[in-house]
Image (spheres, grey):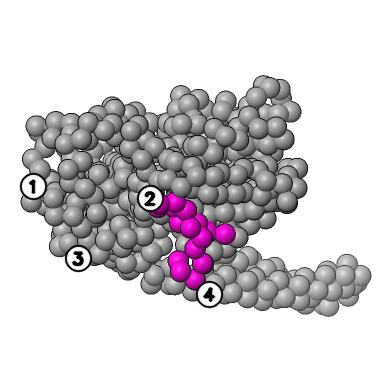
């Protein structure tokens, strides 16, 4: 199906390896999960395995990739802009080069609760919610003839029912799947092999690990191995230090006596003893090079809202009465009664397409020019806030002064950006790295009200606890759309479900 031999991927901008000496056999029916921190090259590896032309403008590679499959399907992390401009009708039926199995298409639509009459709609794809956008892509690619499926963050923005459907589908399909994901639930349910991409030692060294294990067992074995290696390495170093300390005391004693001995016979004996001591010291030094290496892991991100001035806890930031949500002439939800106080943290859940992202956009329109409010916003589509041709430093710099740039560079370093990455075009960054830029922008702006649309969706399992802590410690007000149950339970004080008839309070135990 797919043979990978000694594959090394190098970024052309800074000539740093992203993948190092990867060898793997992908057999028919394998479910290969690619994991790693943000910006470690997961999407790049996926695209290279699929078609090297997709990444040839910014990477070089060595090693071999032997392909023996007939047809592949691909779910990108972001739908290309030219396809976002299409109508639903043109998206499904306008490409004559794609042979759709209509029986599958309509069956999948029914299973995913997507109204099949919308297939012929003139509604523009760009007007769909993030969850619906992902849903139509899944409907289309899964209805084609493929024997190898490439997926880049397939669980992003999906509601819980659709996510469970996807997990079951990928589990049960006899065909081969290679997917990038941060979603521990999806990885645990689907992956049978793991490729783990790491950049360690301040992102200067690429480490690539392959295991023929499911994600849960891989994670457990990795943690157990890390703890054992750490314990063994520390014990060996402690024993070495003790032995060397004792050795140095003996050496110093012999040296002292040797310097003050005038008896030739005693001197010869002491010199012989010193020769043995020096020989032992060389042996100690050789043994030191063979000690168990202290294990290294990718550094965790570090970010804090440390300087904001929160609004009073009793201040009504926004009050909505009988609000309607519409897209064009279509009513998504009505009779929305909602209130946000100055230091509240509120989560919004609901089915894909019900209008959650539209709700956030309406709130943004209401709040962005409101006196006393500094608004931070993370949209579902990052391109709404990011100019892809800018570099991270360009996006974050407002004055251009040297002191400001140094402050920004320090922050970017704490988010695991290298000195070279801060000058890369944003278009070359991963989804997780783009999300980090939006978070950092909120911190630098000292935002006291945050509107967040699926804030954890592109962060690795390692980073997600840090993201949850960032918002748990935040003293301002938050309204967040999320399907991340752990995030909702840890961060949000109240959770509401948005539906066609309004908005209702949900107990955390119901999640």
Res. 172 mark: 3
Task: Tell me if residue 459 comes above or below residue 169 in the rendering.
Answer: above
Point out residue 98 in the picture as x, y percentages from the top left corner: 11, 37
Q: Which image quadrant: the C terminus? A: bottom left
- Dot 1: what SS? loop
Using the image as rendered, state which of residue 55 and residue 201 is in the foreground: 55
Query: Which tag, 3 or 2, sits closer to the chain's start?
Result: 3
Horizontal side, residue 133 vs residue 30: left or right: right
Point out residue 427 in the picture as x, y percentages from the top left corner: 42, 31
Task: Tell me if residue 255 comes above or below residue 118 in the rendering.
Answer: below
Residue under the point 42% across and 37% down: 381
Where on the picture, by quarter, is residue 251? Answer: bottom right
Q: CA distance from mark 1 to mark 2?
A: 32 Å
Mark nearer the viewer, 4 or 2: 2
Q: CA distance from mark 3 to mark 2?
A: 33 Å
Q: Main secondary structure of the magenta part?
A: strand
Using the image as rendered, state which of residue 291 and residue 475 is in the foreground: 475
Query: Which tag, 1 or 2, sits closer to the chain's start?
Result: 1
Query: Is residue 501 shown in magenta?
Result: yes
Q: Which residue is mark 4?
A: 228
Q: Which residue is mark 1?
A: 101
Q: CA distance from mark 4 to mark 1?
A: 52 Å
Mark nearer the viewer, 4 or 1: 1
Query: Which tag, 3 or 4, sits closer to the chain's start?
Result: 3
Point out residue 92 in the picture as x, y percentages from the top left corner: 17, 37
Q: Which residues are magenta?
A: 494-511
Q: Which residue is mark 2?
A: 500
Q: CA distance from mark 3 to mark 4?
A: 36 Å
Mark nearer the viewer, 3 or 1: 1
């Amino acid at each position: 199906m797919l043979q990978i031999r000694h594959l090394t991927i190098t970024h052309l901008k800074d000539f740093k390896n992203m993948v190092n000496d990867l060898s793997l056999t992908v057999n028919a029916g394998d479910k290969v999960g690619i994991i790693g921190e943000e910006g470690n090259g997961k999407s790049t590896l996926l695209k290279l395995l699929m078609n090297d032309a997709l990444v040839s403008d910014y990477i070089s590679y060595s090693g071999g990739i032997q392909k023996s499959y007939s047809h592949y399907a691909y779910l990108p992390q972001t739908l290309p802009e030219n396809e976002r401009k299409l109508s639903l009708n043109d998206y499904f039926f306008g490409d004559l080069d794609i042979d759709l199995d209509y029986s599958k298409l309509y069956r999948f639509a029914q299973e995913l609760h997507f109204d099949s009459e919308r297939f012929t709609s003139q509604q523009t794809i760009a007007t769909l919610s993030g969850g619906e956008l992902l849903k139509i892509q899944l409907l289309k690619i899964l209805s084609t003839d493929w024997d190898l499926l490439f997926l880049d963050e397939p669980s992003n923005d999906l509601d819980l029912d659709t996510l469970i459907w996807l997990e079951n589908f990928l589990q049960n399909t006899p065909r081969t799947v290679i997917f990038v994901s941060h979603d521990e639930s999806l990885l645990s349910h689907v992956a049978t092999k793991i490729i783990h991409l790491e950049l360690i030692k301040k992102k200067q060294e690429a480490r690539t690990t392959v295991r023929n294990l499911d994600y849960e067992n891989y994670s457990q074995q990795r943690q157990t191995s890390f703890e054992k290696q750490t314990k063994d390495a520390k014990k060996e170093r402690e024993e070495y230090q003790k032995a060397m300390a004792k050795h140095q005391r003996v050496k110093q004693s012999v040296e002292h006596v040797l310097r003050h001995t005038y008896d030739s016979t005693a001197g010869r004996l002491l010199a012989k003893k010193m020769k043995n001591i020096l020989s032992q010291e060389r042996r100690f030094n050789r043994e030191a090079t063979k000690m168990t290496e202290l294990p290294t892991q990718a550094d965790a991100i570090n970010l804090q809202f440390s300087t904001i001035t929160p609004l009073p806890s009793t201040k009504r930031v926004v009050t909505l009465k009988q609000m309607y949500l519409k897209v064009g002439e279509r009513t998504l939800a009505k009779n929305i009664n909602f209130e946000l106080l100055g230091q509240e943290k509120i989560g919004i859940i609901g089915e894909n397409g019900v209008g959650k992202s539209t709700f956030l956009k309406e709130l943004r329109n209401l709040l962005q020019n409101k006196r006393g409010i500094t608004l931070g916003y993370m949209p579902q589509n990052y391109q709404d806030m990011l100019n892809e041709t800018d570099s991270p430093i360009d996006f974050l710099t407002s004055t251009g002064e040297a002191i400001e740039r140094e402050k920004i560079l320090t922050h970017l370093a704490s988010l695991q950006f290298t000195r070279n990455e801060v000058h890369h075009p944003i278009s070359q960054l991963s989804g997780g790295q783009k999300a980090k830029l939006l978070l950092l922008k909120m911190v630098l702006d000292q935002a006291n009200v945050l509107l967040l649309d699926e804030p954890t969706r592109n962060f690795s399992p390692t980073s997600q606890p840090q993201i949850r802590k960032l918002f748990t410690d935040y003293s301002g007000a938050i309204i967040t759309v999320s399907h991340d149950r752990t995030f909702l339970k840890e961060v949000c004080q109240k959770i509401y479900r948005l539906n066609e008839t309004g908005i209702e309070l949900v107990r955390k135990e119901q999640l």
